[in-house]
Image (spheres, helix red, strand yellow):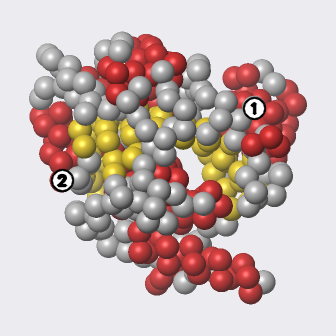
Amino acid sequence: MIPLSDTTHSVPPTEPPTPSRHGGVDGKSPAGRVVLMGQILVDLAVRGEALPSPGGDVWAIDEGMHVGGGFNALVAARRMGAEAISLSPIGTGPYSSLIQAALAHEGITDLGPRVAGTDNGFCIAFTDRTGERTFISTKGAETMAPASAWADFVRTMNPGDVLYIDGYLMDHPANREAAEAALRVLPEGVRVILDVSPVIGIPEGLPSDGVIVSMNHREAQEVARQRGDASARDRCRQPREAARAMLTVLDCPVLVRAGAEGAYFAWPSTAAPDTLDESATRIPTPRVEAIDTNGAGDAHSGALAASLALGIPLERALLLANCAGALSTTVVGPASCPPRSQIEAAADALTADTAAE
């Protein structure tokens, strides 16, 4: 167990280290970039004891306005020291201006298409005393990607880059069309991380190699329900079996996040990394006292994408992602991924604890 005093953190610095384009972790191979194909909007975050009952009213304990959506994952990538690029559509208005300022502040390159005449949307995010989240969102410019906008950039990506796909985009026809067009021109050697999100967004045309589909346990159960697979639904009662079931359903490497239990990674035998057992492998996670889980999955995906872009071996990358997700829950706010030094320290402590057992 990692003591709580070792895992709490303040808001990370606003100027994360800039990665070198001269090399990854070995100083030789070029460092890749993390590219968001998804959407950024504004979170109106409210924290309270519990949601009101229908027709009821409650007082908030805390509130704030933050840039959210795919932005949270890009912030995590920057905390890890990776170069980050946003392809989220940007509109015109106060929310759009807030998003552009936040991207610039975090050193994230903004290459998203511009959408005239409408602002980006917002999400009301309620977090209760247990750290559980409830959302209601509006639709704005971030849901209106032009048909070829993402493909025009994706075809220029380099081997070693990581394309992070936010599953929420599949809920919007224009973004779904643009994403699937981009996947049709994806260059070889570009890795893909798909976070299916609560809407269970899985685009057509995912590559057969170099992809990881990430989801939480609840989302795995929903995938099985939507596919009408009774056997998979039965197997999804426990996270480890859920990972194995999703591997069967999706036929590609699957990562099932299971909160305090850690995460389970499963992959087809033909794609098994040398460093991992050929089964659903449990990836441990630090024990923390969660106060706000909003953005934890984003921190996990962003840290994983950055680790792979920087050339970090998969097993270590999965551990770093777990630590980033866990540590992000110990402070209030969605873009709360800690700096890389704290993530690495937590991962080292977990590794030492495992070796001592």
The answer to whether residue 340 is seen in the rendering is yes
For the point 75% across and 32% down, the residue is 251
Q: Which residue is mark 2?
A: 105
Q: Which residue is mark 1?
A: 251
Q: Position of residue 172 (x, y in %)?
A: 42, 18
Image marks 2 and 1: residues in contact by CB distance under 8 Å: no
Q: Quadrant of residue 356?
A: bottom right
Q: Residues within 10 Å of mark 1 (few under 14, many from 20)?
A: few
Q: Secondary structure at mark 2?
A: helix
Mark 1 residue type: Asp
For the point 45% across and 43% down, the residue is 161
For the point 31% across and 31% down, the residue is 88
Q: Residues within 10 Å of mark 2 (few under 14, many from 20)?
A: few
For the point 49% across and 73% down, the residue is 344
Could you say which is closer to the camera, residue 309 or residue 125? 309
Q: Relative to 167, is 336 above or below?
A: below
Q: Quadrant of residue 153?
A: top left
Could you say which is closer to the camera, residue 331 or residue 191? 191
